[in-house]
Structures are given as structure tokens and as C-alpha cells.
Image (cartoon, grey):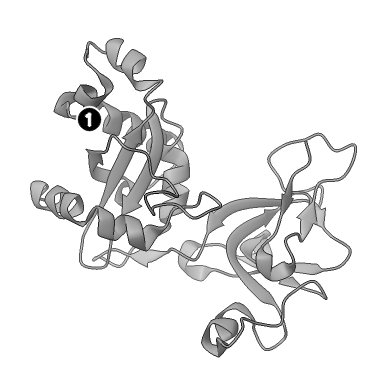
């Protein structure tokens, strides 16, 4: 298995693993056609001097801009021609690059703490019963909430071990099981070093998968965050109103 990293804006690829390197946990070294540098992301405590930062790409494979969209082009390309990917990377000792975070979807909570929701989601998704997760917060709220879609294959057995029986639909409505799932997510968060303000304080269990068909995922199966926020607006408001901190 070979791993690589790139975007449409840099003609698909800018790093690739090499033959003979069977280690995992990285996306390889820069391709000969481009340069890669890391840029400080101070609000998330990532600094290039420590080998961490936003991945920037420069080379003949980098695009010249978006058609008839100067504003978006200026956001992506700086004056020196570096493409700012929005992804956070880390250089490993062997010269390969590891993707560790995402800058694009960062937001602030009411107290001013910066939140990188995708980092949190990547931790919570390790919970056995969790198939999909959307972490929500904004500058008017003091804490995070989450929308969780359980794995229909895993959750019945996971629930049974904890004394819960019922169909998948029934289990999704079980408040005690909902609490058990959130506690497992928070446990993983603590083990992974999340701060208290990075942990969800309430979750809503949704029984249907996010998908391309229902408009909640992109064709490359990435979460469409604005659409998720709008789709679950009612549930998110109810979660916030149910908690007082």
C-alpha cells in the first residue's frame, strides 16, 4: 500500500511514500516537482520551528488560481506563489510528512478558546459504537455538542454488554445508552490529551448515516459542515438548552 497527499489545486499529489518504505502513519516525502514548507499556526500552538504547521506547497504542479474568483484565489495563494492547504502537518525524523490537524474549520468558543473540531472528531471516532460524528460549537456558546451516528453492526452488541437491549432504532433513542456512548468518547478524549473545553458536553444520537445522497458529505466523503449545522439546527439548539454550565 502506497500513501500520498495532495489537493486538486496542486494537480492531485505533492507527497508520496517510496518503494521499500512499509512504515505507516505518514504520507511520504515531497515529490521532486514541488517544495513544501510549514507555516506557523499560532492559535493552535503549531510552530514551524518545532517542525509543525500549515502545509504550503510551491512548484509547477500548483494551480494559478480559481476561474473568475479572485477572492478565493487570494485566500489560497500568497504573493510568493505558495498554496496554503489548510492542513496541519508535521515533519518526521525520516523526512516524511504526517497530517495531524486541519486549520480551515477552526472556530472560537465564547471564552475565546480556539477549537479544531476535526481533531476532536478523529479522536471520538475511535469509540467502538461511533460510526460518524459531527462536533459543533460557535462564538456564542461556552461548550461543544455533538451529533453521533452509531455503527448499526457494532452498537447492538456493544449495548448488550452494558445491559441494553432493543432494535437499532430503539437503542438510538435510549437516553442511558446515549450517556454511555458520550462517556466512552470523553474517556478517549482524556486519554488523547484533550482539554476540558475540547470535550463535548452533550450529544444527539442520529440513526441515519451522513451520506452524499442526503447532502451531508462531499463526493470524496468529507463532512459538509455548514450543511450539517443547518440540518441539525433544531437538535443543536435543544442540546444547548438542556445544559447549564
Furthest-front residue in this view: 213
Q: Is residue 68 left or right of residue 82?
A: left
Instruction: Please state, as top left, top right, bottom left or bottom right, where the N terminus lies in the image.
Output: top right
**Observer-nearest residue: 212 or 19?**
212
Q: Disc 1 marks which residue?
A: 178
Q: Residue at x 44, y 37 (%)?
A: 125
Residue 56 makes an appearance in the image: no
Where in the figure is residue 170, as x and y percent of width and height? 19, 23
Can you give x and y, in whole percent of width and height, for residue 40 in the image?
59, 70
> In screen coordinates, is 125 left or right of 235?
right
Residue drawn at x 90%, y 40% as measured from the top left: 19
13 w.r.t. 9: above or below: above
Label 1 SS? helix
45 or 72: nearer the eye? 72
The image quarter in which residue 166 lies: top left
What residue is rendered at 59% in x and 83% in y?
A: 73
**Where residue 49 appears, x then y in whole percent?**
67, 65
Amino acid at each position: 500500500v502506497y500513501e500520498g497527499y495532495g489537493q486538486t489545486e496542486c494537480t492531485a499529489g505533492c507527497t508520496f511514500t517510496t518503494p521499500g518504505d512499509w512504515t505507516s502513519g505518514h504520507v511520504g516525502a515531497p515529490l521532486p516537482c514541488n517544495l513544501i514548507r510549514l507555516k506557523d499556526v499560532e492559535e493552535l500552538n503549531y510552530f514551524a520551528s518545532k517542525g509543525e504547521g500549515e502545509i504550503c506547497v510551491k512548484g509547477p504542479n500548483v494551480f494559478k488560481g480559481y476561474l473568475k474568483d479572485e477572492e478565493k484565489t487570494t485566500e489560497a495563494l500568497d504573493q510568493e506563489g505558495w498554496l496554503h492547504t489548510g492542513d496541519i502537518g508535521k515533519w518526521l525524523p525520516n523526512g516524511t510528512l504526517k497530517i495531524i490537524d486541519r486549520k480551515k474549520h477552526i472556530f472560537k468558543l465564547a471564552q475565546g478558546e480556539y477549537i479544531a473540531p476535526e481533531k476532536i472528531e478523529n479522536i471520538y471516532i475511535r469509540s467502538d459504537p461511533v460510526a460518524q460524528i459531527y462536533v459543533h460549537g460557535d462564538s456564542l456558546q461556552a461548550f461543544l455538542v455533538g451529533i453521533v451516528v452509531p455503527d448499526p453492526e457494532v452498537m447492538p452488541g456493544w449495548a448488550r454488554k452494558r445491559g441494553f437491549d432493543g432494535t437499532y432504532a430503539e437503542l438510538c433513542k435510549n437516553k442511558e445508552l446515549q450517556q454511555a456512548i458520550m462517556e466512552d468518547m470523553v474517556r478517549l478524549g482524556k486519554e488523547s490529551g484533550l482539554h476540558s473545553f475540547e470535550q463535548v458536553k452533550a450529544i444527539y444520537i442520529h440513526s441515519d448515516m451522513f451520506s452524499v445522497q442526503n447532502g451531508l458529505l462531499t463526493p470524496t466523503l468529507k463532512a459538509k459542515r455548514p450543511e450539517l449545522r443547518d440540518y441539525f439546527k433544531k437538535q443543536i439548539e435543544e442540546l444547548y438548552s438542556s445544559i447549564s454550565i
